[in-house]
Image (cartoon, rainbow, N blue to C red):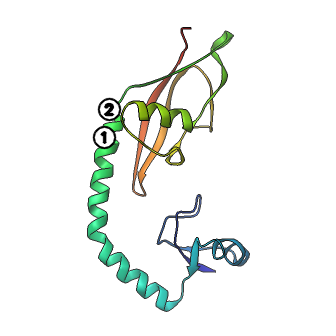
Amino acid sequence: MELILKKDVENLGFIDDIVEVKNGYGRNYLIPQGFAVLATVSAKKVLAENLKQRAFKEQKVVNEANAQAEKVAALEIKITAKSGAGNKLFGSISNVDVAEALGKEGVSIDKKFISVPGGTIKRLGSYEASVRFHRTVISKVAFDVVADKA
């Protein structure tokens, strides 16, 4: 079944992408939830016209995303956490903690656009997270997990 996405869908595609999915997934989940519409000939023509009109505006957004990505890549982020023997953390560090640390540095990014390798971090050390600013702009952010001095 061919569908046009109306919203970003994790592990499937971004808004206005034409995707091929199984019939049940499209009919029972994507279409009723408002995530997609059927990709008919007329819907494809409307999509093509909308994409032409949006191309110029999109370039401005991509330039802003690139500028923000460069700003974030230059930051040195340290996340403090309580730790025990062998550099093990009490708890874990996830994308929420990285988003909060970026917020303290003056960059507000939603946690759903940040992906930490393995999902969570359970040891002290240096790590890298991927931050998606735009569908085409993905940046790596290096951060250190350090022990809490208290």
- Secondary structure under badge 2? loop
Instruction: Check disc 1 and report the residue beneath it.
Output: 70
Where is 26 relative to 139, above or below? below
Q: Amino acid at mark 1?
A: Glu
Between residue 4 and residue 81, name the one nearer to us.
81
Residue at left 46%, top 30%?
101
Q: Is residue 116 left or right of residue 103?
A: right
Residue at left 38%, top 38%?
107
Instruction: Check disc 2 and report the residue beneath it.
Output: 74
Which quadrant of the rendered structure holds the N terminus?
bottom right
Where is 118 relative to 27, above or below? above
Q: Is residue 109 left or right of residue 124?
A: left
Mark-to-mark CA distance, 1 and 2: 6 Å
Q: Residue 32 placed where, x, y %?
A: 66, 75
The answer to whether marks 1 and 2 mark residues whose Cβ atoms lie closer than 8 Å is: yes
Q: Residue 72 placed where, x, y %?
A: 36, 37
- The image quarter containing residue 78 is top left
Between residue 25 and residue 33, name the one nearer to us.
33
Q: Residue 135 placed where, x, y %?
A: 43, 58
Residue at left 30%, top 70%?
55
Residue at left 69%, top 78%?
27
- Secondary structure under badge 1? helix
Where is 137 relative to 82, above or below? below
- The image quarter containing residue 33 is bottom right
- Label 1 Cα crowd, 10 Å radius (few <14 / some 14-19 / many 20+): few
Residue 113 bears which disc, if any? none
Which quadrant of the rendered structure holds the C terminus?
top right
